[in-house]
Amino acid sequence: MTMLHPFTTTCGACGRDSKQLKLMSTSACGSGDLDLRPPEMQRSSMPAWLEFCPHCGYAAKEIAVCQEATTAVVNTPEYQRYAKDRTLPHLAPRFICAGMLAEASGDLYAAGINFVRAAWVFDDEQKDGGSREWRQRAATVMKPRVMDGPLEIEEQLVVTAQWVDCLRRTGQFAEGLEVIEILLAREISDDLRALLTYQRSLTNGCDTACHLSSEAFRKEVREQ
Ligand SMILES: [Zn+2]
């Protein structure tokens, strides 16, 4: 069961107060998706994954903390365009904005993850254009992170699984197959090898649908 706790905090970027949600507990039952999106109930706890200031649009794990360089990015017109865009799904601006801040600071791993999370929000509202746009942007920032490494084992699994899935879900099959072969030739974990092997079979079939990660670990798939 998911438990969220509302609380008030002061934004480090604009100094104004707002209500936020803290994730007290959640649970996950069943398989997540191939891009590591968690199953329910954890899936529905997204409103508490990041804090988002409704006044200036600053998005972070804790908006009370803000560096001067971050405030400068928050105040740019491009950032404000996304932060204040009421035509976007409700949770999309916080993940897009957190991704933009991470990208500006050079943290391409966090940038990619937040752009993928933005795509999940569009998925939930069946807004294919937004899903595609943010998966493409995630793929762009994740590419150098994966190809130029080095990566910790857990980081390698997350960023690689998400990047390869973004390429397939946006129909970039030729690049997807090329990078899957490069990655399979590297020293990687058994779990990542299973995910990539299954992604190769889906990509060969020009499949752009969402799939469960459990499908990659079935015996017949692992032996391909
Ligand atoms: Zn603020």
Image: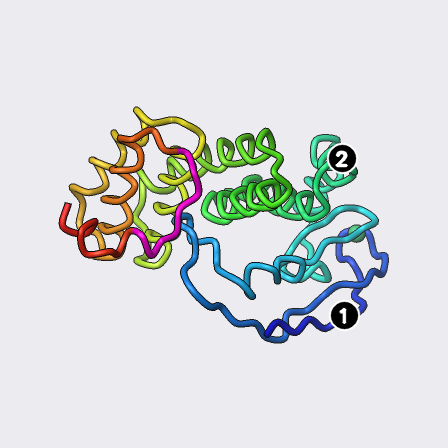
Q: Is residue 122 magenta?
A: no
Quickly name the residue at label 1.
6
Q: Quadrant location of residue 175?
A: top left
Q: CA distance from mark 2 to mark 1?
A: 25 Å
Residue placed at 32% from the left, 31% from the top? Answer: 176
Name the residue nearer the viewer: 202 or 93.
202
Helix, strand or loop at mark 1: strand
In the image, residue 101 sits, relative to residue 213, either above or below, namely above
Say whether residue 86 is left or right of residue 22. Answer: right
Name the residue nearer the viewer: 152 or 94.
94
The 10 Å Cα crowd at callout 1, few under 14, some 14 to 19, many 20 or more, is: few
Quickly name the residue at label 2.
87
Q: Amino acid at mark 1?
A: Pro
Name the residue nearer the viewer: 213 or 163.
213
Q: Is residue 212 magenta?
A: yes
The answer to whether the beta carbon of the residue marked 2 is less than 8 Å from any atom of ligand 1 is no
Please state the horizontal and vertical placement of residue 154, each as a whole percent of the image.
Answer: 35, 59
In the image, residue 124 sits, relative to residue 25, either above or below, namely above
Stretch in magenta: 208-215
Residue placed at 72% from the left, 49% from the top? Answer: 58
Helix, strand or loop at mark 2: loop
Q: Earlier in the sequence, mark 2 or mark 1?
A: 1
Residue placed at 56% from the left, 36% from the top? Answer: 131
Please state the horizontal and vertical placement of residue 145, each as a whole percent of the image.
Answer: 38, 41
Residue placed at 23% from the left, 44% from the top? Answer: 197
User: Quarter of the image containing the N terminus?
Assistant: bottom right
The answer to whether the beta carbon of the residue marked 1 is less than 8 Å from any atom of ligand 1 is no
Please state the horizontal and vertical placement of residue 198, each as a whole percent of the image.
Answer: 26, 44
